[in-house]
């Protein structure tokens, strides 16, 4: 059986990469002339690296003989401290890489099933002339979800995560279909629908042009600034509105966040911030989109707490789909060490999907068998994910994978 020598790399404080070899009984020495020449080239390479190293250059590549795994930073926010290690190429690693991508792509099925009942019901009401029924659909809250989908679409487009791109694109399209129905029923003002149409069309076109490398960098930066300001403006306003009327109804949180985001973006573009500050501003849109989706279960559970009778209108099947859809993305997020993606998917699966299933069981709205099956399925899936990830990376404990995910080292 043929064997290959895996030569690990270490990174010096200047960002250069050097080969390391284990100590052995025998060692080789280089002629003095060759040592001087190598030192000269090493110094020259170090100076080049020092001049070219930037925040976005923290994205890294792991290349193997038979397996090429590519991990890209998106808005420089995916991993706080990017990993710099060489993973040994093996068959199980490549298989798990492929399977996690397939799991992520398969999450389209439950997410589509979540939206289709609403779209079909709206169509039936429109055909029956019952436009008043569509007034119950909260288009403003759905617009928040749309903005979150567009932000995450930009995030994953820069990461070249094709399966996640499809998930977010279908989310945008399905939400826009609902907006179109609401507009036809006059449940959504026409000017707002026109603005939504422009935002959706612009977002889809720009993201896919950028994905294929056909977009001007200046235009893309403007789009990033737009979703950064929009996302940061919406997030605190949604959080504040959740607890009305227990707190005064006000637009001040959104206005204040809008001004802060606008100033931050302008200062970043003018170069008035440090490198860390610019990186932080670039990370805002992805994290605000994630936090928007993470806030959904909190808002739902707060509503359940205030109005326990309303929980009967909550669909257990929809909550199961939400748990499955988000759960299917957890292995991929963990495998590529994307802390933001992992946080959002795990939170939504545990607290939005499963959390509402617990509420339904607590109020005797679902059977014990349904609850136990959902519980067992979720525990087994997360356990399998942690065990398999640690196994392909060669770790003895799944907690090592989680530590690496959080700390980046």
Image (tube, rainbow, N blue to C red):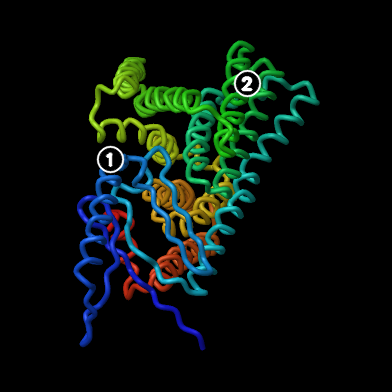
> Label 2 to label 1, Cα distance in Å?
43 Å
- Give 221 or 288, whichever is nearer the viewer: 221
Disc 2 marks which residue?
197
Density class for disc 2 (Cα within 10 Å; few <14, some 14-19, many ≥20) is: some
In the displayed orientation, state which residue is furthest to the front: 33
In the displayed orientation, state which residue is furthest to the right: 127
Which quarter of the picture shows residue 146?
A: top right
Residue 106 position within the rendered picture, expressed as x and y whole percent measured from the top left: 61, 55
Question: Dot 2 lies on which element?
Answer: helix
- Residue at 45% across / 38% down in the picture? 293
Q: Is residue 66 visible?
A: yes
Residue 231 position within the rendered picture, expressed as x and y whole percent measured from the top left: 42, 27
Q: Which is nearer the N-term, disc 2 or disc 1?
A: 1
- Residue at 64% across / 34% down in the picture? 173
Relative to 151, 23 lies left or right: left
The image's mark for residue 51 is 1
């Amino acid at each position: 059986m043929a064997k290959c020598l895996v030569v690990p790399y270490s990174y010096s404080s200047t960002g250069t990469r050097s080969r390391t070899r284990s100590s052995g009984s025998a060692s080789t020495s280089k002629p003095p002339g060759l040592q001087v020449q190598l030192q000269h080239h090493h110094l020259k390479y170090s100076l080049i690296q020092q001049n070219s190293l930037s925040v976005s250059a923290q994205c890294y590549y792991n290349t193997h003989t038979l397996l090429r795994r590519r991990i890209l930073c998106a808005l420089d926010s995916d991993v706080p401290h990017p990993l710099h290690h060489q993973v040994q190429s093996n068959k199980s690693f490549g298989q798990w890489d492929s399977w996690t991508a397939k799991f992520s792509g398969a999450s389209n099925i439950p997410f589509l099933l979540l939206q289709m009942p609403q779209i079909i019901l709206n169509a039936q009401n429109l055909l029956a002339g019952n436009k008043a029924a569509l007034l119950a659909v909260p288009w403003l809250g759905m617009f928040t979800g749309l903005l979150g989908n567009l932000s995450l679409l930009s995030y994953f487009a820069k990461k070249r995560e094709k399966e996640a791109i499809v998930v977010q694109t279908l989310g945008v399209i399905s939400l826009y279909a609902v907006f179109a129905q609401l507009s036809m029923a006059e449940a959504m003002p026409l000017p707002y629908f026109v603005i939504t149409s422009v935002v959706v069309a612009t977002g889809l076109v720009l993201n896919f042009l950028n994905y294929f490398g056909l977009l001007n960098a200046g235009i893309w930066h403007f789009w990033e600034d737009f979703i950064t300001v929009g996302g940061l403006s919406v997030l605190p306003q949604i959080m504040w509105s959740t607890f009305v009327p227990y707190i005064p109804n006000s637009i001040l949180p959104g206005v204040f966040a809008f001004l802060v985001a606008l100033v931050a973006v302008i200062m970043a573009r003018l170069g008035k911030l440090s490198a860390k500050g610019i990186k932080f501003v670039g990370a805002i849109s992805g994290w605000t989109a994630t936090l928007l989706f993470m806030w959904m279960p909190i808002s739902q559970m707060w509503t359940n707490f205030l109005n326990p009778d309303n929980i009967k209108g909550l669909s257990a099947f929809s909550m199961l789909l939400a748990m499955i859809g988000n759960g299917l993305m957890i292995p991929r997020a963990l495998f590529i060490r994307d802390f933001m993606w992992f946080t959002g998917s795990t939170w939504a699966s545990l607290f939005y999907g499963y959390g509402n299933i617990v509420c339904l069981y607590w109020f005797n709205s679902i059977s014990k068998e349904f609850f136990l099956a959902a519980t067992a399925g979720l525990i087994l899936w997360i356990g399998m994910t942690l065990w398999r990830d640690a196994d392909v990376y060669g770790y003895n404990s799944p907690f090592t994978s989680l530590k690496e995910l959080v700390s980046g080292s």
